[in-house]
Amino acid sequence: MTIPILEEMKRLRESGNPEDIEKYFELASQIFSPDDFVTSDEDDEEEKADYDEANAENHDEADEGDNEMTDREVLETFLNFELGSPDEVFDKFLTLENAKLYEHVGDRDCVYVPGTRSDRVLLVAHADTVFAGYRGPHKVILDGDIYRSGDENYGIGADDRAGCAILWLLRDSGHSLLITNDEEIGSLGAHDIRDFHKELFREINEHQYIIEFDRRNGRDYKCYNIPVTDEFKRFIEENTGYEDAGTKSSTDIRVLCGKICGVNLSVGYYYEHHIEEYLVFSEWENTLNLARKLLAGEQRKFPLKAK
């Protein structure tokens, strides 16, 4: 897969033109296998300075309000962020202390929030969705235990706004947070971290291991073709009860895991990238609570298999 093809996909996806969006899906289906496909303006300097100053002044007040929100309310907040841009997600995480935005050639690659624990784990989700051409509000409907779209043209972006909501709810865990961009077009943001933000990539691989929250279904996990150890897989299975879903497909941890093991956990969404997309709240909540329990304990280091 070449960078020009990925850039063309990005252009089509962000145009907002229905015909371009259709071409985007056609091109993606030619590049990715079906399983791959199912898995994923800058302000001027003065405006950015004003925004940062406002966030600094209101940080404590905003954090206090978020702490009063239920898990469900946090999830709904992220599901209702604009589908067509990662900016609302990034801007929310940028209100956290020590959060840093990484950019390359004008693109927002990621937001990184370093953890405070000596045995910190890196938690990952991506802010972009496949519905990048959509602008404005969208309708999310709650039907019993299930969130689905009320729009006949777009899904709900649970891939991966559901994962971003989990990271937000784990923001006080002492572990590090990484919110990436452009996962849906070949993990371009993760590639930029590896290739252009080398100090960040080095720091990422000093963590104990990586958990990404960007997997469909409710009770499985993937390590893809990352050379993780059998011991790491047993650790994940013993602490989650989830089953290994195999090696096909891809997400950001395939790029980010340079020295340490990583896993992608189910967060309860189904039929992602389609208007039929839906999210099962109880499955999302189960993964959140498993992560809370797992991450509260002492964390050991899981290096990749020796070559």
Image (spheres, helix red, strand yellow):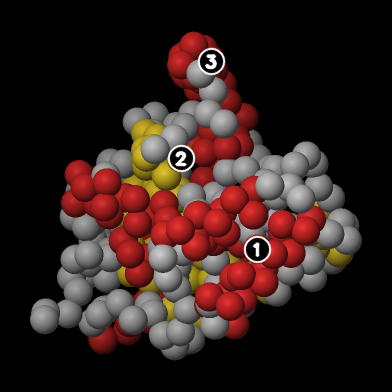
Residue 24 is at least partly visible in this image: yes
State left or right for residue 85 relative to residue 265: right
Q: Amino acid at mark 1?
A: Tyr
**Could you tell me which residue is drawn at 58 percent across and 43 percent down?**
86
Q: Amino acid at mark 2?
A: Asp
Between circles 2 and 1, the one closer to the viewer is 1
Regarding mark 3 in the picture, which secondary structure is present there? helix
Q: Nearer the viewer, residue 3 or 46?
A: 3
Residue at the limit of the structure toward the left, as seen here: 307
Regarding mark 1 in the picture, which secondary structure is present there? helix
**Could you tell me which residue is drawn at 55 percent across and 56 percent down?**
8
x and y percent of residue 36 in the render?
Answer: 53, 77
What residue sits right under mark 1 in the picture? Answer: 24
Mark toward the start of the polypeptide (3 vs 1) = 1
Disc 1 crowd rating (10 Å Cα; few below 14, some 14-19, many 20+) is some
Disc 3 crowd rating (10 Å Cα; few below 14, some 14-19, many 20+) is few
Between circles 3 and 1, the one closer to the viewer is 1
Between circles 3 and 2, the one closer to the viewer is 2
What residue sits right under mark 2 in the picture? Answer: 107
x and y percent of residue 72 in the render?
Answer: 69, 52
Q: Nearer the viewer, residue 50 or 133?
A: 133
What residue sits right under mark 3 in the picture? Answer: 47
Mark toward the start of the polypeptide (2 vs 1) = 1
x and y percent of residue 61 in the render?
Answer: 56, 21
x and y percent of residue 11 in the render?
Answer: 59, 50
Residue 164 is at least partly visible in this image: no
Question: Up-down: is 14 above or below 259?
Answer: above
Mark toward the start of the polypeptide (3 vs 2) = 3
| Residue 302, quarter of the rendered image | bottom left
| Residue 67, quarter of the rendered image | top right
**Could you tell me which residue is drawn at 47 percent across and 32 percent down?**
94
